[in-house]
Image (cartoon, rainbow, N blue to C red):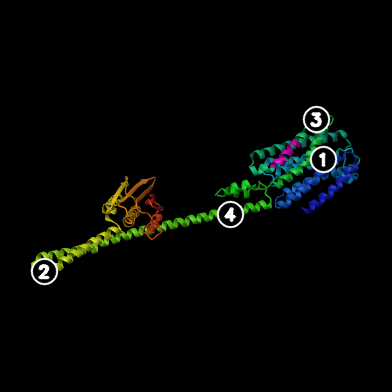
Amino acid sequence: MTGLLAAGFALGVTASALKAAEGSHSALDTALSTATGFLFLLAGAVAHVRRPANPIGVLIALAGVALFLEDLQFTPDPVLYTIAVPLRAASSPVIAHLVLAFPHGRLRSRWERLLVFAAYLVVLGTGVVGLLVNDDPRDLLAISADSAGGAFADRVLELAATAISAGVVVVLLYRWLTGRLPQRRLLSPVIVIALAGALASGVGTALGDGHPLSAPMLQGYRILFCLWPLAFLTGVLRARVGNAEMIRLLLERDGTGLAALVQDDEVWKDSRSIDALNAAAGLVLDNQRLTAELEQRLAEVRASRARLVAAGDEERRRLERDLHDGAQQRLVSVVLLLRMADRRHGGALPEEVRALLSGTVDELQTAITELRELARGIRPAILTEAGLAAAVRSLADRIPMEVALSVAEVPRLDSAVEATAYFVTSEALTNALKHAQTDSVDVRIAVAGGELRMEVTDSGVGGADIDGGTGLAGLRDRVQALGGELGVDSGTGGTTVRAVIPLGEDP
């Protein structure tokens, strides 16, 4: 790229001197052509610095070199003139190539490649024909000094350039209409100058040299053409993703839009934009990965807690069966044997022995009652046999206080859900009995929206704290293990314990 720019600069200085010395062009025309060539070189250099891997910077600089090559035809040297004549319109196919390849640096479709190939073929072909029929004495390869033939070649070249310009404009408009916002932002300055320049050039060429409007239209085209490198340069400087676009892409949780934009070569981004986009894409993808890992870990924790609850319930049932079928039955058998012995031999026993035997039976009966209460606290048999509603009603009947019970139609639920709901109700009623200093409690249980909802409310002194050492703290963990929530609202007007447990198969 450095060599190309150096050659272009040298050609620019030479071409400007030749054109000024030739004398047939106005100072404005010479200044415009010189400025246009150097602006193309400048825009190409900036483009190459912004994205060295993209060949678009080289194409922009080549357009400036081609413009200076056209002006070599003003040389008095026959050899240089003979070389320059076929290149007298060299900028036309190069600029067509540049416009169609902008901004990604390559021709994408077969029609674009065909259009560019036709541009090079027609322009260079007509240049060679003009060289062969040229009547200029500097032409060393002229085989026929036919001024009419030369004029015809010039006319064909002008019409071909007009057709090529029209094709390029059509492709540009189609690309702008079908492109995304960043690409439209990039192409807009180029299209505006291209449309205005093509209109001025086309009208001026079509009117012919004799028409009074032809010269002003062509002069307007030259001015617009001088501004065209600035349009490319503006596109280069605007080739970045704006803040709003970046925010929108970052808000896409899956990151696909951002990743597509980073990889999309149709939207030309400078090195800073590429770095920013790559960094943002990395953050999005890392966030997705960490979120997925966290969700997986949470699912594993929930499943582990659910298994612990299920294992605890199974152990409760085993203990309840062991107590009922083991120690409780043995104590009942002992009581029966003692009563049988009292009936058969009581009359022959001393009074103090009979009193001792009767006390022993009473103590054993008390132990059996306490053992039954213990077994019921582990997991009441009625909960397993009749379900949550019946178990809560039985619990309310045993509590020595007034319980206003509201239990809607509650079907049989998963054993873990039923056990958790029962123990929450039992703990809330026990706390109200011990600490609330009230003689009435409201209990409401219902199934709604795929959830079991429970609420135990008293009008006592309040002051309950779920983290204050009550049994509700452990029950909260049990409820959360099933995917639910347990909360306590307590104040001077009383205490309310609420629990919500989802009824899905997977907590």
Q: Which residue is mark 4?
A: 283
Kindly tell me whether residue 291 is visible in this rendering.
yes
Distance in Å between CA atoms under marks 1 and 4: 56 Å
Q: Main secondary structure of the magenta part?
A: helix
Disc marking residue 127: 1
The amino acid type found where label 4 is placed reads Leu
Q: Which residue is mark 2?
A: 351
Which of pointers 1 and 2 indicates the residue nearer the eye? 2
Q: Earlier in the sequence, mark 4 or mark 3?
A: 3
Q: Which residue is mark 3?
A: 207
The amino acid type found where label 3 is placed reads Leu
Kindly tell me whether residue 131 is visible in this rendering.
no
Q: Which residues are magenta?
A: 187-197
Q: Secondary structure at mark 2?
A: helix
Tell me if label 2 and label 4 are in contact, CB under 8 Å: no
| Mark 1 neighbour class, 10 Å CA radius: few under 14, some 14 to 19, many 20 or more | many
